[in-house]
Every structure is written in C-alpha cells, then in structure tokens.
Amino acid sequence: MRKSLFAGVLLQVLFPNLISAQDKVRSYANQLEKKFNIQIIYEKKVTDTWNGSRYDIPGNRKLLLNYLKIIDQEFSKYPAGYFQLALADILILTQNYHFQENHQAAMPDPYGRRLYLAIDGHKNNYSTEYLSSVIHHELQHNTEYAIWSSQYYKWDAWQNANTENFKYGPGGISAYSDLNVDWGSRSNPLPGFISLYSTLGQEEDRAEIMSMLMYNKAEADLHAFCRKDPILKKKIQLLSSKIEELVESSGFWRTANQPCYTNE
Ligand SMILES: [Zn+2]
C-alpha cells in the first residue's frame, strides 16, 4: 500500500502532464456516463459475444479526449434513454480494432449491450466526419436488434419501397473482399440509396441512412437527395416511424431533416 502510494507520488513528480491527462480523460468519461446513462470502458479489454475482437487498449490520450468530444456531440442528438432502449449503453473504446482478423472501425454487439468503437478509425481515417458517421451507423445495428431481435431483419415494407426487382447484395462484410470499389461515398448511386455500401443489405441500407440523418454535416447532401428521390424519402419516413415506436419520441432526425419529411 505504502509502496504504491510512493510510486504514485513519484510518477506524479516525474510525469505531471501524464497524470493530469489521464484524470482529464476519466473525468470527461465519467461526465458522459452520467449524462447519457452509459458506461465507457477503455482501460481494459472486454471480450465480445463471439470472442472475435482483437485490439489495443487506447494509449493516445489526445485521440481519446477527441473521441469523447465526438461522443458528447453526437449522443446529445438522441432522445433521453435511447442508448438503453437501443441495447448500446456500454461503449468499449479501442485502437487498432480487428474483428476475426478484419481491420474495421467498429463492431456492434447488442447481445452484450455493447458497441466496440475504434478511436483511430479505419486505415488512418479518423476525421471527425468519419468517426461520427461510424458511431451512428453502428448504433443503428444495435437499435435494429432491439426492435426485431435480429441484426439482419428482412422488412417487407422496406423491400417494397425499393424499385421493383431490386435485390440486395450478400451483406456488409462482403465489401471487405473488394476494397477497390468506393463503397462509402455518399452519392445517391441508385434510386433509394445513399451509397454503394447501402446496396449490400437491408440492415446496412438503414444504418447508412441513419448515419446521414444524424450527422449534421451530411445534411445538405441528404436533403438534395431527398428532393429528387421519392424512394429515399419514403424509406427515411419508414425508418423514423419504426424507431419512434421504440423510443416514443420524434427525435432529432425529423426536425433537422425537413426536406426528407415534407412533400415540398
Ligand atoms: Zn454496418
């Protein structure tokens, strides 16, 4: 006891900035835990439901603080109690995240109420825009499990909203086998879709839409798509109504995205 106290004092004398940075991160994390009624874990590794996660404990304090700011900003847009209802109230912050050997920016684990989030993004992309979009996208996967008890639910109303004969691809994971394709760019490549990644599965389609609805900086593009794409508009309205059944709130997306909800 005395030895560890001495070590602590010595550490503080030798590395005062290190100690204060650590305190700053933990105290901000504590603040967010209270604010959103969530748990934020970054000091230790947590096994996921499939035991497939491999990652480093985040060592970069600056990145951690930056990531907490993004959580603060993006989580504030959801109605109170959302993360508990969406089975996403435990955030595991990671660096260099891999799931079953696949390098990726995040992993939804609604069975454990968890979201694994890489604070260093994917392949050196850790821009605020990318990290924010990833948070909303992955959160939607947990939300879908909360609604349908499946992350891969095939919703007839959703399928019917698409053009006749449209068939989804074999799921989001298949994108990793062809990284030459620009899956992620937001471009309205087909009626009803906001990226090529959206065409890989119903669940990815909805996660992509939710991500664009929630991230303000994507607003202008999304609204432009809505104005000329009635299928996309119909899907956005279907999705919002479904989520509102879960959270009993009209939420940020409706007020912030009027062009997708009105027939202007
Ligand atoms: Zn996804």
Image (cartoon, helix red, strand yellow):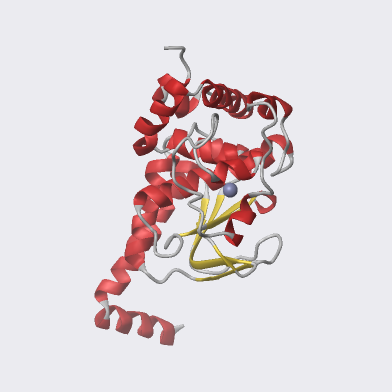
Q: Is residue 118 above or below residue 234?
A: below
Residue 160 seen anywhere in this rendered image of the structure = yes
- In terms of depth relative to the viewer, which is nearer, 61 or 34? 61
- The residue at 50%/33% (across/down) is 80
- In terms of depth relative to the viewer, which is nearer, 79 or 160? 160
- The residue at 61%/70% (across/down) is 101
Q: Is residue 22 above or below residue 190?
A: below
Q: Is residue 84 above or below residue 103?
A: above
Q: Residue furthest top?
A: 264
**Left or right: 46 in relation to 4:** right
- The residue at 54%/29% (across/down) is 191
**Left or right: 233 in relation to 59:** right
Snapshot quadrant of residue 214: top left
Residue 37 seen anywhere in this rendered image of the structure = no
Snapshot quadrant of residue 103: bottom right
**Can you give x and y, in whole percent of width and height, for residue 232 in the image?**
53, 27
